[in-house]
Amino acid sequence: MSIQLKPVSDQTLVITGATSGIGLATALEAADRGANLVLVARSPERLDAAAEQCRARGATVETLAADVADFATLELAHEQAHQAFGGFDTWVNNAGASVYGQLVDVPIEDARQVFETNYWGTVHGSLVAARHFKERGQSGAIVNVGSVLSDRAFPLQGHYSATKHAIKGFTDALRMELDKEDVPVSVTLIKPNATDTPYPEHAANYMDEEPALPTPAYAPEVVARAILSAAEKPVRDVTVGAKDGVMSALGLVAPGLVDKISVPAFFDQQKSGTPASGDHRGNLYEPPSTPGRTRGGVDGHVFESSVWSQAQQRPLVALGAAVAAGLALALISRD
């Protein structure tokens, strides 16, 4: 089945979680390219600010204050896109929430809330978009933002890792079902490495220290470019950044070895050294009160590009890289 996608400049995109981090970076990059936008997030004030930034770059923007955990409100985003732009071409499921802490310390209700936002929010948006494309018979793209944790769980982020594993399973199943029905939709899973966004400060936290991102990290604009590339050219999945991507690949052939590496590495790297505040739940249940921004200001190097992710979006280069990686992993597993 041939899927022909438009240039982003000719598209309308629906982006959830659009007021900070990767979502805001994607909206701004799409605005720079001339796309129409429907921005979805919980806070009306932050949405207004994001929309103004995009309009200042020349975009036509609609906003919807909605919680992605509520299926009915995402249907409103679908209707809003139809009324304003006659439909949409790409739907980006980006909204996310997280909680830090050992699994035995995290309240079950908080774990469920992470699933409501990450997994069910992705399911809701994907089904709304799939129905749209199926009914109209037009080519389009569904882009789901997973994580390298879709492939390899991290300690202290067990519930978040589980949601990203679930998103991968759902995305793979949706892709096959749409293909079976000859619905011309590209379904992509984007798997970022650690990304310099306000993610740690927004997360719920049950550790004795404030959370931190493992460094080096990648700029959110690097992920945004991968998302928009997937909106223009069909691709199955893209790991943004080689740092943790190599660890994920190694985990396929030597999972026990990666477990041993992860224990000393990822416990300390996810703690900032600053004593934790008394507010455990962060922005898990309420939107942030601070202005939205793309960067989190990590204390360490931030990559502004990723050759690894660019290669995956070029099939012949990706095939060569996969063969080389497979040979390298085979040699490691023999030692």
Image (cartoon, rainbow, N blue to C red):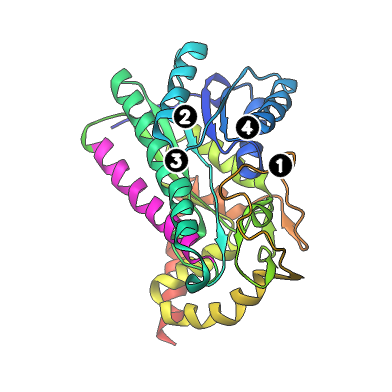
State the residue position of label 3: 69
Q: Amino acid at mark 1?
A: Ser
Range of residues picked out in magenta: 157-179
Q: Amino acid at mark 4?
A: Ala
Give the spatial CA distance, label 3 vs label 2: 20 Å
Residue 215, relative to residue 80: is it above or below? below
Q: Which mark is residue 289?
A: 1
State the residue position of label 2: 90
Q: Amino acid at mark 3?
A: Ala
The residue shown at (60%, 44%) is: 286
Residue 208, relative to residue 12: is it above or below? below
Residue 125, relative to residue 334: is it above or below? above
- The nearer-to-camera label among 4 and 3 is 3
Q: Are marks 3 and 2 in contact (CB under 8 Å)?
A: no
* Residue 126 location, quadrant: top left
Q: How packed is label 4: few (under 14 Cα within 10 Å), some, or many (20 or more)?
A: many
